[in-house]
Amino acid sequence: MLRVRSYSLGQRQRRKTVLLYAEGKIHAQLLQSIMEKIEKLPDTDIPDLQALSVLLGFSKWALITRFNTSELPQEAAFALEQGKAVILLDRFPFALVLPSLLSDLFVSQNDRNFPVIFMFTFRILRVIGVLVNVLLPGLYVALVSVNPEVLRIEIALSIAGSREGVPYPALVETLLLLLILELTLESAIRMPTTIGPTVTMVGGIILGQAVVQAKLVSNVLIIILAASTIANFTVIGFQNATALRLCKYLLLVLSAMFGVLGLFLGIVVICAYFGHVSTFGVPYLSRWKAGRKYG
Amino acid sequence: MDKSRQTIVMFWITHIGLIFFLYPADIIDSLSVGHWCAVLLGFSIHIALVAVYTKGLSYCAPQNVIDLFQSVGRVFAFAMLLPLTLYLFLLMIITVRAYAEIVTVVFLGNTPLWTIMLLFLAVSAFICLLGIESLFRTGMLVMLLFFPFLILVVVLSFQNADWHYMLPLMDRDTATFAYVLRRPFLKSMFAFIGGFLFLGFIPSRISFQGRKIVLSSLGLIPFFLVSVYVPLLTFGENTASKFPFPYIAAVDTVDVSWLMFDRVTMFFMISMLCFVILFLSLAMWMALLLLKRGIPALNDPSASLLLIAIVYSVCLLVPNWSAVERLMWWNTFPRYYAAFVIPLVVYALGMRHRRKEPVRA
């Protein structure tokens, strides 16, 4: 049964806040902790979601988002049905779903509108997307600069050939191009749709082609970064995608220092971080089931 | 809440990480025919110890080993746990030093040893400081990511097997268990013993069923056998005994034409190393627990810094591989103490505990 609790938070800037949950389905401890946090500090202003996450007691510097945002009513309804909590804030155009779990990277309610096989295919694709996105740039740097002997000799030679004339180490090369890519992404966000394609063209075609011809980066790297960037957007949720984008840099640096070993240990570090994060006692790495006990 | 699954996964990780590097060489060194006998003997000792240990722990359920020993008396606990701490320290030193050496030998020839050791210690200290529950969850995720790969390599490693090398199955030496007191066999027991002590240290929040652990450890037999038999079947006994890491050498012979990588070994080794890192952080977590109990003034970060500093400086003092081997041999005694005395004492105390409160629902 759907329950709605309304609060009016803040002193100078009163903001209506609604906590939605399905009674009997929500994990009692989760509900209680959220309510406690909100009711304890009713005078805190919430100008933005950072303030909300401070109010809820999350670390400011967390890499992983503790609530998923969704603009689709179907997603929020499904989350409620599953026993999660949904917070709606006045003047924010989306619902905040608590807690966020690793599976939210891959699982969307909309998948269930397709046959089961399609659903699993999509999910597997997303998992592969995450792995490709996080691993490929690091793998490239590791294989080119530290452990070329791992590759088959033909591939090693062709990569070495494509890097002929590139003046700096693989790490710098990758970081430069990644920077350009991130700039492209960032600039495209607030662009009117009419100019959007221009950025794509300038960034993708002109820059990509010219940068290879000018021997500033190798063309294999262009392929790898393009694949990695595309893979990045298979992940559900912008915040999740951004977190993964940041993880990529950790792996990149470790790979440049320790080769494939650094890459793999970087994965272990990221896994450990994921394992560490939990939201109100629900671990990020747990499998969500309505009515299940955590902690 | 029953966390048997996580515990089992951690149990597997710690053992699999230990099996594939040094274990096959020790077994191949210890006898020339019928290696299965040595493997199975070691394994049955292992499983008996695990069974005794988990049984003892279940008798005194919410207490862990430290609490249990302290309930008898402070001096008793100190005397019992001091060798264990020594063992854990030596274990960490050996693991870090040996695996750093393996890494430089096999694929990071130009990287200085001290950076690799520092990396190992830093990563495992990071994981260890996040807490035991995080460590267990990390283990699940790492297992999920790397285990399919491991299975693939294990299957592929049979590519060059010649099954005739399997024979003869037995000889006099094997049948009379004459190899048991030989040094390589005694050393080989590290693969069976290092991994299960953590069961007695995990807090009662992470509960597990001993029976499930014992049953699941049966699943490790194939890995032990594969690690010894693949090099034997690939090279034959005479050649295999010449390699320092026979299984790695055997995987190196595998050629997979559809893979873009020339050396499957490297990825295999590194996923093993990730398991070893988890094992290391588990050992570090246990050592921290003991250290903090011994010196209550220490808090988590300072204790771990102290620990890393000690381990790291000793690691730097170890000059070469023969010194590592000497250390391994020295560690055999504390290891047997940790492996036999601790489980048996836990069992005895557990029995006593149970007799004291006979009605415990």
Image: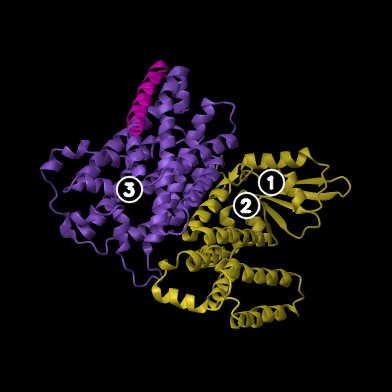
Chain colours: A yellow, B purple
- Give a yes or no on whether discs 2 and 1 share a subunit: yes
Task: State the residue in front, B296 or B356.
Answer: B296
Q: Nearer the viewer, residue B105 or B215?
A: B105
In this picture, residue A200 sits left or right of residue A129 = right
Q: Nearer the viewer, mark 2 or mark 1?
A: 1
Q: Secondary structure at mark 1?
A: loop
Range of the magenta residues? B334-361
Q: Seen in the image, is A98 located left or right of residue A120?
A: right
Answer left or right for B40 relative to B100.
left
Find residue A237 and report its horizontal and vertical position in percent: 64, 61
Q: Residue at x 51, y 25 (%)?
A: B294
Measure the C-alpha gap from mark 3 to mark 2. 42 Å
Amino acid beneath label 1: Ser
What label does residue A100 carry, if any? 2
Query: What subunit carries mark 2?
Result: A
Q: Nearer the viewer, residue A113 or B354?
A: B354
SS at circle 2 = loop
Labels 3 and 2 within one chain? no
- The image shows residue A134 at horizontal and vertical percentages of 55, 62
Q: Residues within 10 Å of mark 3 (few under 14, many from 20)?
A: many
